Amino acid sequence: MKTDDPPRVGRLLREWRQRRKLSQLDLALRADTSTRHLSCVETGRARPSREMVLRLADHLDVPLRDRNGLLLAAGYAPAYRESPLGSERMAMARAALRTMLLRHEPHPAAAVDGMWNIVDHNRAMSVLLGFVPPRLTESGGNVMRLILHPEGLAPRCLNFAEVRAHALGRLRHQAAATGRRDLRDLYEEVSAYPPPPGLDPAPGPVDPTGIAVPLRIRTPYGDMSFFSMIATFGAPADVTLSELAVEAFFPMDEETAARLRAFASASGTGEGDGSGSGPGAGDGDEPGARDGTGS
């Protein structure tokens, strides 16, 4: 680093401001400070207080993990803990995840971390994961790899080009919004996967009559069509909690709903009764444990 480079916290704050496409005046007005002081912070002529770092990070919508990084760069201790999901501190969060997953049966649902790694799922997810090679579901698997890998869901996806475009767009946006190198690396990896033989990766026109981009998949139980919703924890104060999400899949049509009910009946999967034995079920079980139902 050149001696005339601004301190790291100033450069990081400037990068976040530019990533959010804000001028110094815009950010100064939002954070109730002066443009001159903000300029001095970014160029290293002034050292921001701990409160100022957190205030700027809040108005820049910086993820909790990176807020800790900003504090460390400014010479302060991190403000947010990063608790292992299996720790006692996270017991209530694990219970909440398990409740959501089980109550969503007979429909598939999975809990994922900030890198799209599956940390828990209900038994209905075996509708989607049951025919995927075990090496792709080791340690739970990664949603982006499962969707786009030529040995994953891709060969059975009936609208692969549409799903691929949506998944890559989502991942690209997330990587740009957070600036995370690991997400950019994941994007570079999965975007380079070759399409399954005979499948065109170029998306066609968007269906103007649809309500969402569907996932149409060929399963051993018949063709199924899903849309999904993503739920996150409100007002998280822990890095791990802030990066967790639940992706819940819903049937796009009555045929899919009927096939899911038939699968649940045949496999003994409870319909929202909390009786599932999927990963993480039961008191004290670690999330992400596998139940041997095809995943």
Image (cartoon, helix red, strand yellow):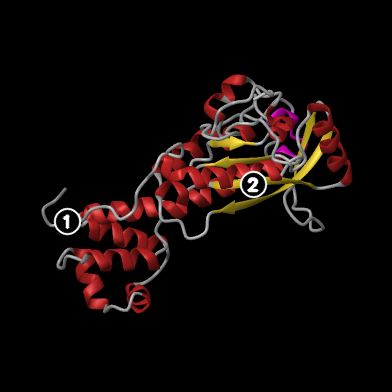
Q: Position of residue 148 (x, y in %)?
A: 62, 34
Q: Position of residue 206 (x, y in %)?
A: 74, 53
Q: Position of residue 134 (x, y in %)?
A: 61, 20
Circle 1 packing at 10 Å, graded few (<14), some (14-19), many (20+), is: few
The label shown at residue 5 is 1
Circle 2 packing at 10 Å, graded few (<14), some (14-19), many (20+), is: many
Between disc 2 and disc 1, the foreground one is 2
Circle 2: residue type: Met
Placement of the C terminus among the 4 image quadrants: top right
Task: Give the magenta part as a residue range.
Answer: 154-160
Residue that appears at 46% across and 36% down: 86
Specify whether 138 is left or right of 89.
right
Residue position marked by numbered label 2 in the rendering = 100
Compared to 217, does 167 lie above or below?
A: below
Compared to 147, does 228 lie above or below?
A: below
Residue that appears at 58% across and 30% down: 193
For the question of whether residue 165 can be seen, the reply is no
Specify whether 263 is left or right of 41.
right
The label shown at residue 127 is none
SS assignment at label 1: loop
Q: Position of residue 142 (x, y in %)?
A: 55, 34
Compared to 7, does 251 lie above or below?
A: above
Circle 1: residue type: Asp
Q: How many marks?
A: 2
Residue that appears at 65% across and 21% down: 292
